[in-house]
Amino acid sequence: MTDFDKIYDRKNTNSLKYDFYKERGKSENLIPLWVADMDFRAPDEVINALKAKAEHGVFGYSEPDKKYFETLRNWFATRHGWETEPENFVVTCGVVFSICALIRAVTKVDDAVIICQPVYYPFAESILDNGRRLVVSELENHDGFYEIDFEDFEKKIIKNKVKAFILCNPHNPVGRVWTRAELEKLGDICLKHGVFVISDEIHSDFVYGGNKHTVFSTVKPEFGEICAVCTAPTKTFNLAGLHIANTYVKSSIVRGQFKKELAKQGFSQPNIMGLVACKAAYEFGAYWLEDLKVYLAQNLQLVREYALNNGGFTLVEPQGTYLVWLDCRALGLSDGELSRLFEKDAGLWVDDGTVFGKGGSGFERINIACPRSVLKLALDKLCAAVRNLRR
């Protein structure tokens, strides 16, 4: 059993999560529960593979080989029942990087791209930064269970002549794992109106209970031609700093356009250490992931108990991811007051719900992928701040 309780000192390691308080306008000594990386060491097999490459000492231009793509194929077939072909993968330095390139590949300047907020905030940034029009279809919150407003989604597509949709599955931050039926309905709408789907599935290895992740392109054969599936081992195995992602594009036309956009950015060969880590993780890391999922489920139970017993905030029950969406609206605070409660009073660095869109007002997102003692301390501090607020 992997020891996820062990605390590793990440300060003074150039860690975005721990070392850049001042640059991010935050107070020092906050407990960081914000950005989506984990406080756990990668599997030993990954570390050993990186050590072996480092000891070799030659770090020239490198390409993924046949064994690399066989490892991808085996992982996705075993974990998700998804049969892939090596020629359809494009290796890049990250999922957001791929999303930006795909936006440019399948749309033109001033074209509309739709997202369902509240959602991972780089989606909106990627659309706007590339000169496209942002269209939002708000998710519906039914007593803590989020659903897609399909009628609004289709109306917005027609009204704005939308050309692309960025899907988040599992959904960050609300934790939904969309069902096959929901994905089919989304796909049928997009197919009907000529909308290309960019499916961000980076959290696909984190699904809880009886929920099952469904790869969008597998829902219907025709969906494969109108989508790109963005995957990476970086969330699953805590490898974000190694900048590696594998984007699956079945359409040869779109894949060619995608590669052309990558070439325009000067991107060719990926990071050799990213290739090494990805292959080792997918080949040998399944046991580590299973241990991790058990640990995360226990962390989630801890949050659940605090939410039930201390009041002030409600857990939006996640079906996937290690990011927890807390409903704090019962506190009756403005978003500014809520942010101050978490940071100034509780001493926590979290992600304010408003960064994910207007539907995030009154919510906060926390990252539970940390040692349980750290999470418990953070929850104790939060509950104390809430009690003081109510005195």
Image (cartoon, rainbow, N blue to C red):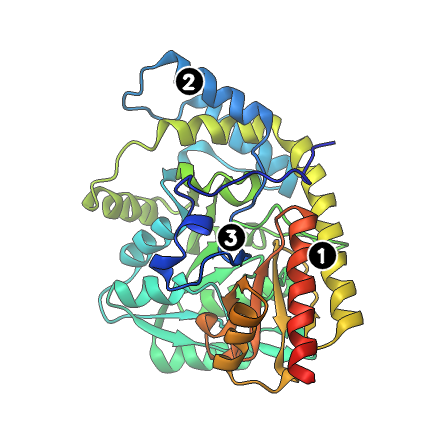
Q: Using the image, determine if residue 266 lies above or below residue 161.
A: above
Q: Is residue 130 left or right of residue 346?
A: left
Disc 3 crowd rating (10 Å Cα; few below 14, some 14-19, many 20+) is some
Disc 3 to disc 1: CB gap under 8 Å: no
Does label 1 or label 2 sit earlier along the sequence?
2
Q: Residue at x 69, y 70 (%)?
A: 383
Look at the picture and state if 229 lies above or below 8: below
Quadrant assignment for the C terminus: bottom right
Q: Residue sitting at 46 percent across and 15 percent down?
A: 52
- Residue labelled with disc 1: 300
Q: Secondary structure at mark 1?
A: helix
The earlier-in-sequence mark between 3 and 2 is 3
On the picture, is 332 further left or further right than 69?
Answer: right
Residue for point 70% across, 79% down: 143
Label 2 packing within 10 angstroms: few (<14), some (14-19), many (20+): some
Q: Is residue 209 above or below residue 11?
A: below
Q: CA distance from mark 1 to mark 2?
A: 36 Å
Closest to the observer: 146 or 53? 53
Which sits in the foreground, 80 or 51? 51
The label number, if any, that marks residue 379 in the structure image: none
Q: CA distance from mark 3 to mark 1?
A: 15 Å
Q: Is residue 301 left or right of residue 99?
A: right
Dot placed on the residue nearer the N-terminal end, 3 or 1: 3
Name the residue tied to disc 3: 36
